Amino acid sequence: METTVHAIFRGRVQGVNFRMETFLRARDFGVKGWIRNLPDGTVEAVFSGEENAVSELTSYCRTGIRKAFVESYTGEKIENQHFHDFSIR
């Protein structure tokens, strides 16, 4: 089943290749959407794809990026959105 999640990651998530690592893993999982740094030091993303793939990508972002430390994560399902690819904004 397709799902779309709007996510905010807080902690040491900028300056540690968080967006690039997520971009590469999103391609592996077939997840579409986007990711960007916000001025307050957080990272915002929208992940869209198969529910298991989105869940795996979210889990990877929370614990699998070596130099990052995610102190908190907020994710909410939103109306499904369809993207052609995954981009870094």
Image (cartoon, rainbow, N blue to C red):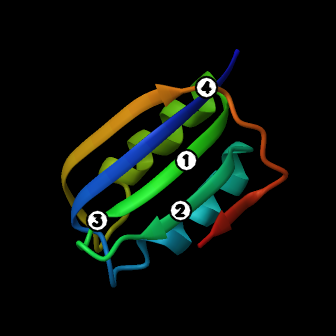
> 13 above or below 80?
below
> Dot 4, how many residues are within 10 Å of its Cα: few (below 14), some (14-19), or many (20+)?
few
Q: Residues within 10 Å of mark 3 (few under 14, many from 20)?
A: some
Q: Quadrant of residue 34?
A: bottom right
Q: Is residue 52 above or below residue 53?
A: above
Three-letter code, disc 3: Thr
Q: Position of residue 85 (x, y in %)?
A: 79, 56
- How many numbered marks appear? 4
Taking the image as shown, residue 79 lies to the left or right of residue 7, namely right
Q: Do the CB atoms of the residues marked 4 and 1 lie less than 8 Å apart?
A: no
The amino acid type found where label 2 is placed reads: Ile
Real-space Cα distance between discs 1 and 2?
7 Å
Q: CA distance from mark 4 to mark 2?
A: 17 Å
State if disc 3 and disc 1 touch (CB < 8 Å).
no
The circle on residue 79 is: 4
Identify the residue position indicated by label 3 in the image: 42
Seen as rendered, the residue at the extreme bottom is 15
Q: Which residue is mark 2?
A: 35
Find residue 15 and report its horizontal and vertical position in percent.
Answer: 33, 84
The secondary element bearing badge 2 is classed as: strand
For the view shown, which residue lies furthest in the left direction?
A: 71
The x, y position of residue 1, in whole percent, is 70, 15
Q: Amino acid at mark 4?
A: Glu
Residue at horizontal 85 percent and vertical 51 percent from the top: 84
Q: Earlier in the sequence, mark 4 or mark 1?
A: 1
